[in-house]
Image: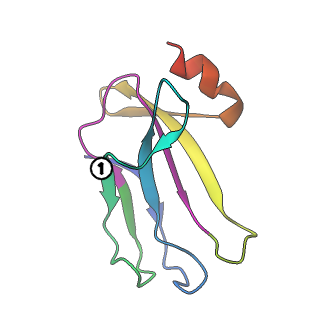
Amino acid sequence: MITVKRFNDFNPRRYGNPWIAIVDKQSGKIDFTQRVGGYTGRYGAGEAGELYLTNPQVGAVYAYGQKDYRGNNTYVAYVVYRGEEKLEWIEKKDLVRELGK
């Protein structure tokens, strides 16, 4: 397992649970059908925890984020697994380049 991000306690009425998913190389869309990791905090409780990847694939692009139900602070970030437990954060504008590799 590789920790992608640590989260502090948060207001569960405002923020959704942190999530992580793989980005499909063909379509460039986030694929929520595959389970690629999880969150150690208790779901629905706003508990602090770690967002992690299990069995990452070298060269795969992963997206992760957290929904803000009020719409002001929702975010999505992207990482590429480079091997040897190393993640490289990338900008959304660089997705096409990374997915084409």
Q: Horizontal and vertical percent for residue 68? A: 64, 71
Residue at left offset 55%, top offset 40% = 78
When asked about the image quadrant of residue 19, the answer is bottom left
Q: Is residue 60 visible?
A: yes
Residue at left offset 61%, top offset 17% = 97
Three-letter residue code for mark 1: Arg
- Is residue 58 placed above or below 14 in the rendered structure? above
Q: Which residue is mark 1?
A: 35
When asked about the image quadrant of residue 91, the answer is top right
Disc 1 secondary structure class = loop
Q: Which residues are magenta?
A: 52-67
Residue 66 inside the magenta-drawn segment: yes
- Is residue 68 placed above or below 100 in the rendered structure? below
Q: Is residue 40 left or right of residue 59?
A: left
Residue at left offset 49%, top offset 73% = 8
Residue at left offset 50%, top offset 42% = 30
